[in-house]
Image: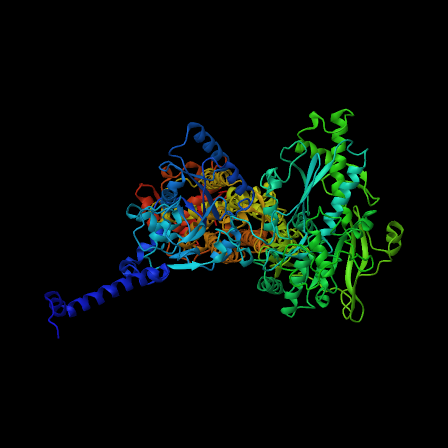
Amino acid sequence: MPALSSFERKLNKHATTFLIGGLFLSLSVLFYFAFCSLPCDDVTSGLSRADLRDAQNKAFWNRNILAPSRDLVYPEVVFIMSAPDNLMGRDTIRETWAKDLPNTVLLRFIIGTGSLSTQQHSNIHRENFIHSDLLLLKSVNDSYGTLTLKLLESFKWLDRHVEFTHLIKADEDSFVRVDRLAYELQKKPKERFYWGFFDGRAHVKKTGKWAEADWILCDRYLPYALGGGYVLSSDLVHYVSSNSKFLKLFNSEDVSLGTWLGPLDIKRSHDTRFDTEYKSRESQLTVVGVHGNYTWPVRDKAVHTQGDLILGALHMVHERSEDKICGPIMLQGGVQALETMLYTLDVINADQKLLPGITLGVLAKDDCDRDIYGLEQAVDFIRGSIANIGGSEYACHDGSDPVILGVIGAPSSGFNELEKLLKASEICIAATEKMIKDSGVAGQATYDKTVERLLAKSNARGVIVFGSDQEVGMLMQAVRRNNASRWFSWIGSDGWGGRSLAVDGNEIEVEGSVTVQPLAFEVKGFRDYFLRLTPQNNKRNPWFVEFWEQQFRCKYPGSSWTPYNDQFNVTCSGQEQLSPSEFEMEAQLQFVSDATMSFAHALNNIHTDLCAGQSGLCDVMMPIDGELLKDYLVKVNFTGLSGQDFAFLPNGDAPARYRILNYRQVERGRFEWKTIGYFLEKHLYLDSQSSKRIFNKEQIVDLKYRWEEPKHPDSVCSRPCHKGEAHHMIDGSACCWTCSPCHIYQYLPTKYACVDCPLGTIPSYDRQSCVEIVIVYLRYTDAIAIVAMTFASLGIIATGVVMTVFIVYNNTPVVKASGRELSFVLLFGIFLCYAMTFILVSKPHETTCGAQKYGIGLSFSIVYSAILTKTNRIARIFRAGKRTSKRPRFISPRSQLFICGAFVAFQNAVGVVWLLLRPPRAVAYHANRDDHQLVCSDAVGAWYMVGFTYPIVLVVICTFYAFITRNIPEAFNESKYIGFTMYTTCIIWLAFVSIYFSTEHNIQIRIATMSFSISLSATVGLVCMFATKLYIIIVHPERNVRQSLLAAKPVMPSPKLTQCYSSIPSSYLSNGRQDTAHSTQSDYGDLEMVHRLRPSASFSSSISRSTCATQTLTNGTSTSTQTLDLISKGADDVQL
């Protein structure tokens, strides 16, 4: 073996080391390339920040909710990155997809104003003053290079000022379906959510406008959503805003956002509907429109014919498609309507008398029976130009861009007007469901939910459907899927009435429907014109080849590809012929022709008025003023190509002429539309003779629902309520209610609410009003009043008799001994008590009420003041007789009258003050809801007790004095009768008070009870105080002498009576008689009472101290009696 060199020896020595090192380097390189070749979303899917997973930092994601100073609240916010000078782009958005944004969406155009000129600033601020939808960032110099900074600054503003749930970011050349996004966002996450079209394997751009020179990560971008449109939850916006000073700003704003959110543990939702870069995704439920063109549908395809003036038109040339936006060509409607317009323009341009020297052209587009797509197509008409088509292809004769003069298209839905009409007719809408035309949203599930909601209103079986025949067809299929084929009764608009597309395959569901169809007549000459059309002679209609292919099921040579002609294996020869018998003409083409003729006649009238006979367009006429054209349009009046006169109504609508149709089985299994009436300009014709005479049409038939159920079912939410029941509305509907019975005292001023009848009234029989309850009060004719007045009348008579007797026998001892003055006062008081009954039972009035308040207290105070004066006088004499022989003070008649008058005066003062403080009133009193009493206001409650308070005090005092004078000797014991009177009175009034407070609900009983109590008290006083005296005076006049009034006592030992004549007035001793000229009854009565009350011995010893003569009385009577008889012999009055 040859010897190894030194190098080889070293190599062998370190071979293992080199092998291991090389293997390590190789593996490193492989891992590097493998890592960088992975999709970025795979690379970052495992990355997450520990602090985001930490439970302590979960509040970080919710800080958006707690952040201060947010003065705006919107669930969704739309940011549109806009250039300062692109006013046209912003106006286009405002007039298209942002025109009818709900008030829950905040729209802002983001503009940097840092480097704007003074003029630009002025324009921007003027625009913002008008629209208030610009977010102006002073810290940003607006340019492509600062898009990332503009995005970041807008996020910071949004986080500080708006409380929101999701942000929708878009470019100003994007078409955003905000309605669809808002609908889907309800089901999307509200936190850590990033939704858009993600490009996770895009290579980093090294050159060009979007080159990322500072990109130091792998050779592919981190996952980011394309900037044309994406959605972020609010917490991600807050995250970016809070960490803005740490974030790297890359050249592309969408790449920057993807990088900022790359390491976060969030949900990224990839959705091809957000793809706005190159290719349309509209066939996959578009939410954000595309930037570029696409093959189907061909948006720029249009009918354009030259003319001095151009009319715009939108036609439903294609049907709607579930997955392709535009479906196959519409055989019956679209192409025929378009050709009708072209035919009418040919007729107009050929008529030298109509628009002399002026030709009309047309720019017609297809809306595919879709609102959004049609809106996109109509942007040219809205903006008044066709600049997007390009002047190289379409231009006026003078080379200028054409201006759209007017637009002819489908009428708007009349639902709002119908709703007003139904409400005026008290026909209610139980539910309103929108049939969405957009094929991206309105699938089977959408229609199924619509039917389910209709079925939820089980009583509302009548359904009014505004829609096209295709929409109605899909709705009927959903009805069949929900097993409700025979449940609903349909009322249809003219959009599907009489059309076969709505009913083909849905006969059972549509059976019984009532629809209207515009009453149109054939456009003369159009049928022959249309049947002669072929692809060779109709080059101006770019859709006619499609129509030809669809009609004859063949592929026309050289035609463009469509999703519908690639299924045809037969090639069209071009010799095919439209057969009148096999081809069905659209029935409403007259309206297209009349609309076109309206513009022609309006322009002709303008030309006549402004151009003074000049042929062609004159300078005064150009440019056409829109308001002027509108004024002339509404005034046109002409005979159309159908032979019918045409004129607009004052509100701008065309004349209302409709055929009323009913879809029914004419025999088992065979269905037809049958005419059941006509409506012609406010007149409805439902009988055969009238319709045949006016329209010369087929005989109309009666309305019918179904073969087995001729009568249409009732469609009511709630049945009518019974009498006396209120309607309580449900969910704000005017036709859905529950019935609630009104209370017995409630009425129904309207049918919606029970209202309490005012007090004193009750509901009428029909519960529509309140009627007054018959007012009651104590009348003279009432039985209880008659009894009370009879009792009072007898008392008045008895009082009169007593008073008459006392007047006749005024000077007899009995009358004198009774105290004549006070007796007459007492009799007057008793008379007033009886008289109060007649005042109490009279009809309440201010006068009678005042008399009651004042009279009750006055009458009682007179009675009991007189009795109190009597009892007080007796008590004082009784006490004085025990202590001294002196006569007590203030016992003369004059003094007694004064004392009695003072007592009565106090009651008078109380009565007057009471009248002043609480004036009497007659009021209605309602003890309960059935009661209506007319009473004095003081009869309610305890107010009358104010008048009784003072008399009750007098009664108590009288009773007290009657009690303490009960032991006066019998011969002078009038106090016994006073006592009996007061005891009885107390019993009566104790009973009355309890009755008074227990009759608060029946004032008539209270007043009657009061009347009886007053009369009874008067009767007690009259009988007790005067019956005995009257008995003596009338029955036993022999006892009405002085001697008989002095009762005999048993014989006592004969005491001595020492008489000191000097101590006794001479009048007492003059011939044994009183000097009647200088004395009164009480003088003797009082002295006699004093002597009768004192013992004889004491009296004798008292007089003996005057050293006078002494006599001894020895006759058979008592010494005291004889002595008093001697003293008072000849006296006029003796006190009993």
Locate residue 373, reporting x and y percent: 60, 50
Q: Is residue 635 left or right of residue 757?
A: right
- Seen from this angle, which residue lies furthest top? 612
Residue lying at 84% horizontally and 44% vertically, measured from the top left:
643
1084 over 264 or under it: above or below: above
Locate residue 495, reporting x and y percent: 71, 54
- Seen from this angle, which residue lies furthest front? 2
Which quarter of the rendered picture does the N terminus lie within? bottom left
Locate residue 155, reporting x and y percent: 37, 46
User: Do we see residue 413 in this rendering?
Assistant: yes
Q: Nearer the viewer, residue 881 or 439?
A: 439
Q: Nearer the viewer, residue 704 or 421?
A: 704
Q: Is residue 838 left or right of residue 73?
A: right
User: Do we see residue 1090 in this rendering?
Assistant: no
Which picture quadrant has residue 754?
Answer: bottom right
Residue lying at 72% horizontally and 68% vertically, measured from the top left:
508
Locate residue 922, reporting x and y percent: 59, 44
